[in-house]
Image (cartoon, rainbow, N blue to C red):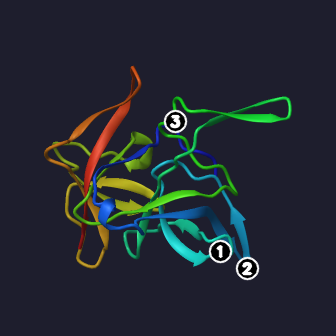
Amino acid sequence: MSFIADTAFLPRMWNNRNNDLQNVAGQFGAMVSTTWTPADCSAGFLCNKGEHMAAGSYRMTQAANGKGGIYACNPGDVQRGAIGNGIYAEGVETLGLGIPAGRLDTYSELIPGETYAFGPGNFSTLVDAATNKYATITNGLLVGTNAVPEAGSGIYFQLDEGLGIDVFTEGNTVGMNRYNLLCKSI
């Protein structure tokens, strides 16, 4: 899987101070027959937590829908560059960085009642303030819709009425649209 353009994830209103297990280390990929195949994971991509790995992390796979524990790829990595045999980390322009295949990083469990921000690349159909105020999950992406999903669908989102749609900024640069979504469950 290659990286998706214009993705981002940012917890806006959450309670991780009272839930130390909301963030877990994981490696994204897929089980092909009996073989684990690591893959790139874009920021904010929605996943399910799989089996525990020997390194103390979890195998994270693409969330088909809102059922089960839903986690968002929440990378805390930085830009890296190589000069000779050295690899150097540059802590600028980190918004929307994905996780390269085979690397461990952070995945945040999405909890109903908390608000999260996503970039436009995290949607296959965007939400808006007029018609598509809700979003469901399909194949790791958000799908804007005009109705609350049916009972038993699990996690879904509603455009946060107070925060709405604004713009991500990083430093003094104007970035992309930021979609502030209230996490819900049905």
Q: Which residue is painted at 23% across and 77% down in the image? A: 151
Q: Amino acid at mark 3?
A: Thr
Q: Residue at point 67% right, 35% down?
A: 80
Give the labeled residue for mark 2: 34
Sequence order check, earlier mark of 1 and 3: 1
Q: Is residue 152 above or below residue 133?
A: below
For mark 3, give the secondary structure.
loop
- Quick check: 13 left or right of 175? left
> Mark on residue 7?
none
State which quarter of the image contains the C terminus: bottom left
Q: Position of residue 90 (x, y in %)?
A: 61, 31
Q: Nearer the viewer, residue 10 or 185?
A: 10
Residue 10 coordinates in the image, percent (x, y): 37, 46
SS at badge 2: loop
* Callout 1 amino acid: Met
**Mark 1 vs 3: CB contact within 8 A:** no
The residue tagged with tag 1: helix, strand or loop?
loop
Q: Nearer the viewer, residue 179 or 85?
A: 85
Residue that sits furthest to the top in the current view: 172
Instruction: Name the residue type under label 2.
Output: Thr
Q: Residue 66 at x, y = what percent?
A: 37, 69
- Residue wearing tag 3: 94
User: Circle 1 is placed at which residue position?
Assistant: 53
Instruction: Measure the alpha-carbon separation of dots 3 and 2.
Output: 34 Å
Closer to the camera in the image, 153 or 29: 29
Q: Which mark sits nearer the N-terminus, 3 or 2?
A: 2
**Lower sequence index among marks 2 and 1:** 2
Would you say 30 lies left or right of 169 here?
right
| Label 1 packing within 10 angstroms: few (<14), some (14-19), many (20+) | few
Task: Tell me where residue 26 sits by quadrant.
Answer: bottom right
